[in-house]
């Protein structure tokens, strides 16, 4: 199947490119652990002052942070490098070459530059989630549903990123956009139920970061209603559709405005 | 192979205010102006032709090329390339064309060119054996052997352009768009590129559309030229007729052994020599005439330089 | 060299306006204080922690947001990019010192950043009006002085890490480490007063608090007169240290840059 061959070739090329830059696995692992440490630190400071917060204990909130760290790892390994590469292409005027390949541009742009070494962060995140899972006595059902929801969340993240990249065609200097996603994701390191009113609404329906981190944590506790879980999947699919539309629209604009 | 009818492209460009107040004002109001990059362009190119696009900077050559490749959507007008509408960017269409841009490359920067070749072979869904054969052929024609395993960033501009050409032609496209391919290259590399393009055109029958500032490129490669200035078509026809029509013909210079007369038939004295500017057909008769009338020390027949011809064309307002 | 400074500022402003979209994004990315504000607001909802009620929490984090933006810099990324792509070399040939250029660039973006920040400030005020307080004039005066020193330390810190790009490809990684520690120790994510005792003791001796916590605490009126001068004095010391280090690493880096070849 030629699509599979294309994808494999792209991933191979991006892997080879990364390998050209000698980065040590140990260095990355140390960084990942350190990063996890100061990501979880504020949580301990907060729960030091208040043993439970909006029905969440420290261990349960730790699961949220764990999923947050996994999402961060995916961002750094699979999302960020691609975003930077697209921005560079648009700036250099070489994005046209992407459009001339007989492969869907969105697919191409999602795969052509990755940093697999950063997936170490995901491993650390999984470690944190594992610890939290143990603390809340999660069984296989809970683990499975948490995994499914996390995958839905990661799909959502990819869609958000696609929307961001789509705007790269409008603004020239968009290196900061990856920071924007990070900042948005930052709100997701706390359980969504801690937020109130308007902010909570935004984080659940408009920029559903809660879906990425809080829902899997709820599933881990065995407290996620099946209807909520299903709703989350639906939202992920909807967002994928929105992202696709944003992408095609901005390509259209690119092909009428660039010179 | 390529048909263009009444093609137009208009850009809206924001006008930015000057000075401090201008900068602040431009946050709130956006003045735009319209720039017509391509105006009512029409032409048609047969398969296997080699056509040169000539024109001053900003004439609309690259814009036209991009519209033909499907990268830009025209404001109005139609074009058909290899039987397709380029804007649809049908994968079948993309397999039939290729674009090479001077100083911009699709080669993967950190990897040896051979990796880009492998990637392109996969992306274009090429059958392995045939692709290998094409690749070997290109490597041989462009003399890429010593370059294959060095990272692209370590290659010189000329070497990169040759690899770029190979990467662009692996899928044996029917149409080859070249946008200033020799810009920035040294003379040797320019010659090599020109020779290759001519060779490839013979071998593969690909249609070649070339834009360039270098007359040498056009003169060496393109029997037919399309001249665009200010976005509009100024000339479409054989290169040699261009000089004929706009160059004021050829310049015949006769140096006489004794002092030259003021006038002599079609000749006029300029800087101590007899000069006549005549259409090609009349040159032989004039030379014959001069040889009979005066003692000739030296005789030369000059083509008007292409640059002069073109400046005249560009300056013309239709 | 400094005669061109006003022109640089004007050009910087024009540039800032031209890239206003990017500036909005930049402002939006520093939302951590807002998030922390919501979280700690929730914590204080059950009941105030010591002297920290919801009003106090909102006040602290709003000031943290403002001070963060006053003292923010991006020169570490600019330097990294410029050194990597070789565009620093032409800057070194100009009669204007590149760092002066970057300072101007930083300062000239402030008006626009203030404009973009204004709606956020208004929004927070509308949400928690009880955060408003009547500060004593000396706290504001000293707070602003403190903010200037905080800016100097933060900028110098970025110059240090940016200059490391002369020596290593990993300099941004090192900056990330610094940033992580900074976010913990500067009072950005939680008021230092609310941290566990052992952590607070450690953080007292680190420079991070001088870049954010000190000016914020001063402006919020959380510091008594006797302690205030001590805090600012600590800032001065850190500023001297950081600026000195910045000058040193920069000069060493430029020397190496010239030796290795651009």
Image: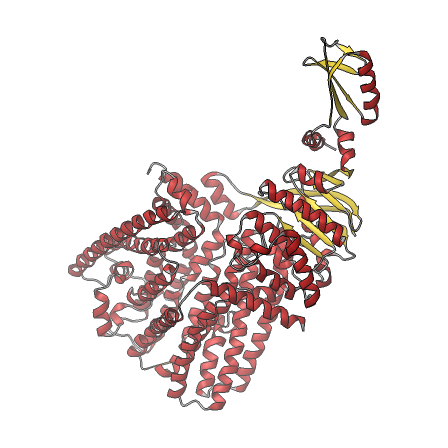
The residue positioned farthest toward the left in the image shown? C226
In the rendered view, does B156 fall on the left or right side of B198? left
**In the picture shown, does residue C232 fall above or below A236?**
above
Name the spot of residue B196 as percent of width and height, x first: 68, 48
Name the spot of residue C88 as percent of width and height, x first: 41, 47
Q: Is residue B154 visible?
A: yes
In the rendered view, does B98 fall on the left or right side of C12? right
Quadrant of residue A68 within the rendered picture: bottom left
Q: Is residue C103 visible?
A: no
Quadrant of residue B84 within the rendered picture: bottom right
In the rendered view, does C78 fall on the left or right side of B14? left
Nearer-the-camera pick, B64 or C184: B64
The residue at 20%/57% (across/down) is C234
Name the spot of residue B203 as percent of width and height, x first: 75, 53
In the rendered view, does C37 fall on the left or right side of C248? right
The residue at 61%/70% (across/down) is A241
Which quadrant is the N terminus of chain A positioned in? bottom right
**In the picture shown, does residue B3 fall above or below B117?**
above
């Amino acid at each position: 199947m030629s699509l599979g061959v294309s994808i494999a070739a792209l991933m191979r090329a991006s892997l080879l490119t990364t390998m050209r830059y000698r980065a040590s696995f140990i260095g990355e692992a140390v960084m990942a652990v350190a990063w996890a440490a100061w990501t979880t630190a504020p949580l301990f400071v907060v729960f030091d002052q208040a043993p439970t917060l909006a029905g969440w204990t420290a261990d349960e909130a730790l699961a949220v942070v764990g999923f947050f760290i996994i999402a961060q790892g995916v961002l750094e390994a699979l999302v960020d490098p691609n975003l930077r590469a697209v921005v560079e292409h648009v700036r250099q005027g070489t994005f046209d070459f992407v459009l001339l390949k007989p492969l869907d541009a969105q697919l191409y742009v999602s795969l052509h530059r990755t940093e697999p070494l950063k997936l170490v962060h995901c491993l650390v995140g999984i470690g944190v989630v594992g610890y939290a899972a143990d603390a809340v006595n999660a069984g296989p059902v809970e683990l499975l549903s948490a995994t499914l929801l996390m995958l839905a969340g990661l799909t959502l993240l990819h869609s958000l990123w696609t929307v961001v990249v789509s705007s790269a065609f409008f603004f020239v200097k968009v290196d900061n956009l990856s920071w924007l996603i990070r900042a948005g994701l930052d709100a997701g390191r706390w359980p969504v139920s801690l937020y109130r009113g308007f902010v909570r609404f935004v984080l659940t329906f408009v920029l559903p970061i809660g879906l990425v981190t809080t829902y899997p944590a709820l599933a881990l506790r065995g407290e996620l209603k099946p209807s909520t879980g299903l709703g989350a999947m639906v939202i992920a699919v909807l967002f994928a559709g929105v992202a696709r539309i944003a992408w095609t629209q901005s390509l259209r604009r690119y092909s009428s405005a660039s010179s | 192979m390529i048909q263009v009818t009444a093609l137009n492209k208009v850009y809206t460009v924001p006008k930015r205010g000057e000075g401090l107040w201008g900068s602040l004002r431009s946050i709130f109001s956006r003045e735009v102006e319209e720039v017509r990059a391509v105006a009512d362009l029409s032409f048609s190119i047969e398969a296997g032709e080699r056509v040169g696009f000539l024109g001053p900077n900003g004439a609309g050559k690259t814009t036209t090329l991009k519209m033909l490749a499907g990268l830009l959507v025209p404001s109005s007008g139609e074009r058909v390339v290899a039987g397709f509408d380029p804007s649809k960017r049908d994968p079948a269409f993309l397999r039939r064309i290729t674009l090479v841009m001077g100083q911009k490359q699709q080669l993967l920067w950190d990897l040896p060119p051979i990796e880009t070749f492998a990637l392109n072979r996969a992306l274009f869904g090429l059958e392995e054996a045939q692709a290998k054969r094409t690749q070997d052929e290109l490597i041989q024609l462009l003399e890429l052997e010593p370059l294959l395993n060095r990272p692209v960033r370590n290659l010189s501009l000329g070497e990169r352009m040759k690899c770029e050409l190979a990467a662009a032609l692996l899928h044996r496209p029917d149409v080859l768009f070249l946008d200033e391919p020799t810009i920035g290259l040294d003379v040797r590399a320019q010659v090599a590129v020109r020779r290759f393009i001519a060779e490839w055109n013979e071998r593969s029958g690909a249609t070649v559309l070339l834009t360039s500032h270098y007359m040498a490129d056009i003169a060496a490669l393109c029997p037919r030229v399309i001249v665009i200035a200010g976005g509009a078509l100024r000339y479409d026809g054989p290169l040699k007729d261009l000089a004929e029509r706009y160059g004021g013909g050829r310049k015949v210079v006769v140096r006489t052994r004794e002092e030259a007369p003021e006038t002599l038939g079609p000749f006029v004295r300029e800087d101590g020599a007899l000069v006549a500017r005549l259409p090609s057909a009349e040159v032989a008769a004039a030379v014959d005439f001069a040889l009979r009338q005066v003692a000739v020390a030296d005789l030369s027949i000059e083509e008007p330089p292409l640059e002069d011809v073109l400046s005249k064309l560009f300056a013309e307002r239709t | 060299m400094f005669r061109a400074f006003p022109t640089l500022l004007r050009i910087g402003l024009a540039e800032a306006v031209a890239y206003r979209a990017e500036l909005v994004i930049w402002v939006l990315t520093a939302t951590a204080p807002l998030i922390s504000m919501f979280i700690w607001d929730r914590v204080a909802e059950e009941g105030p922690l010591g002297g920290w009620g919801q009003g106090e929490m909102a006040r602290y984090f709003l000031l943290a947001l403002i001070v963060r933006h006053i003292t923010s810099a991006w020169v570490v990324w600019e330097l990294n990019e410029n050194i990597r792509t070789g565009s620093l070399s032409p800057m070194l040939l100009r009669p204007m010192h590149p760092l002066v250029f970057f300072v101007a660039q930083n300062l000239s973006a402030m008006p626009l950043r203030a404009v973009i920040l204004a709606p956020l400030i208004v929004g927070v005020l509308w949400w928690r009006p009880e955060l408003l307080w009547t500060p004593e004039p000396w706290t504001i005066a000293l707070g602003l002085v403190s903010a200037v020193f905080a800016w100097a330390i933060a900028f110098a810190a970025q110059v240090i890490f940016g200059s490391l790009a002369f020596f290593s490809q990993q300099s941004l990684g090192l900056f990330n480490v610094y940033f992580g520690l900074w976010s913990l120790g500067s009072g950005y994510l939680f008021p230092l007063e609310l941290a566990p005792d052992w952590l607070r003791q450690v953080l007292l001796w680190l420079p991070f608090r001088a870049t954010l916590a000190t000016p914020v605490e001063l402006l919020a009126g959380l510091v008594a007169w006797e302690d205030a001068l001590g805090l600012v004095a600590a800032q001065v010391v850190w500023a001297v240290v950081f600026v000195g280090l910045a000058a040193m690493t920069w000069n060493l880096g430029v020397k190496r840059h010239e030796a290795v070849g651009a």
